[in-house]
Image (cartoon, coloured by chain):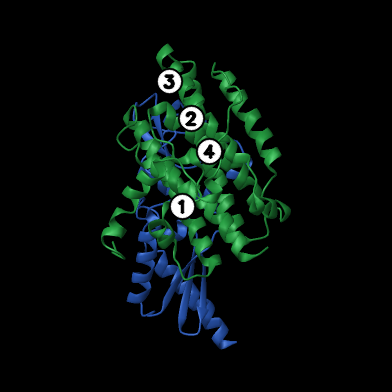
Chain colours: A blue, B green
Amino acid sequence: MVSKMSQVQEKELIYQYLSEISDPEIPVINIVEMGVIRGVLFHGSKLEILLTPTYSGCPAMDMINHLVKEKLQNKGYDSVEITLVYKPVWTTDWMSVETKEKLRVYGIAPPVGKATSKKGLLNEGSVFCPQCGSKNTEIKSMFGSTACKALYLCNDCLEPFDYFKCI
Amino acid sequence: MELLDLSRFCMRLGDSCLIMAHRQSEMCSKGPFLEEDIAQTNLGLDLLGQAEALLIYAAELEGKGRAADDLVYKRPERDFYNFMLTEQPNTDFAFAVVRQFIMALYLGKVYETIAKVDDDTLSGIAAKAVKEITYHQLHLGMWVKRLGDGTQESHERVQTAVNELWMFVGELYEEDELDLKMQEAGYAISGNEMKAYLTVKISTHLTEATLSVPEAVYMTTGSKKGIHTEYLGYILAEMQYLQRAYPDAKW
């Protein structure tokens, strides 16, 4: 029982360490908030971290692998293995309200609605400008600075901004 | 389901994604304007990610000790199984758009089917990819329409692309022994179903874009046996150059 308790605590501690790692492309949110950490497993002295990619070709994944290993090795875990898992499929629905707010403050319009609602990835007409809060926005390009974003323009404050696609 | 069959199935699909990604990467700096340039490379990135996931799985199932990189960099032309359509050159923007649009329709249907199979890795890869490909269909479909009912010049160019690429569409619903096995196991729809789906989707879209659907032509065949048009060799010459000049070089 005692050892079970300590493993739960250790897991919490590892999640805490991992939450110190910023997303390589969106530095205001960490990789736990991003939802890419899908599990922490103990195999004797070996630690296995389950990761899921955001997009199939997300170039940040290699960097995240590297940062996870580096962080845990610095915390004394010499044997860390990272396993890529595909199920359940990553979705922006896993982002908490707080995480979405962090994105907005940083200047990225957070995903609107639920991916499962099938209302479409772009939610044209309901994306708010992260700068001035106006709803009078239009899409400029379906593709933005990274695979997960689209480019929008605010018709009121005239600022262009990234929208985190609802996927 | 024999592992080797599943491996070959993943390799075929992965090869098509890989070659599409390469063609898409060649569009970098050649988009008609900056935002579209970024869009084109992003499309390539998704496809490269899908290719990587599929080829890692194909290599693992094959169990010959090869890694995904070995499959990409060390196979000769005759051991690649991508559709001939995917290797056709970016003659102009219209060719690139039409080729990728038709393939996006095809891939969407394929991923939708394998997202339901009882294999967590493959169905997971497909469930993720289907979201990405749906987005590609929207974007590329927009371009087919925009070019089709645009200027006389754009209309003529996109119609030429459709006409020239049409002979490569037949491979997408062709069936060989492996396809039949995969269909039986529920991993693929039949050639007839795929043909009907593609015909309806493509014709409807072309008509909306004020373009005409080409008349029946002779359809090429052979990529499932590793036979290709002249263009694949040039792609591989560039893609595999470094690994051939400096075997096993690491980044």
- Give how far apart the Cα atoms at labels 1 and 3 are: 32 Å
Q: Which residue is mark 3?
A: B157
Task: Name the N-terminal-most of marks 1 and 3.
Answer: 1
- Any part of residue B82 in sight: yes
The percent position of residue A113, horizontal first and vertical second, equals 56, 41
- Give how far apart the Cα atoms at labels 3 and 2 are: 11 Å
- Give how far apart the Cα atoms at labels 2 and 4 are: 9 Å
Depth check, mark 4 against mark 1: the one in front is 1
- Give how far apart the Cα atoms at labels 2 and 1 are: 26 Å
- Give how far apart the Cα atoms at labels 4 and 1 are: 21 Å
Q: Are marks 2 and 1 in contact (CB under 8 Å)?
A: no
Are labels 2 and 4 assigned to the same chain?
yes
Q: Are marks 3 and 2 in contact (CB under 8 Å)?
A: no
Task: Name the N-terminal-most of marks 4 and 1.
Answer: 1
- In the rendered structure, which amino acid carries the disc numbered 3? Arg
Q: Which residue is mark 4?
A: B103
Q: Residue furthest top?
A: B152
Which sits in the foreground, A43 or B88? B88
Q: Residue at x 41, y 66 (%)?
A: A18
Q: Residue at x 52, y 38 (%)?
A: B135
Q: Residue furthest bottom?
A: A2
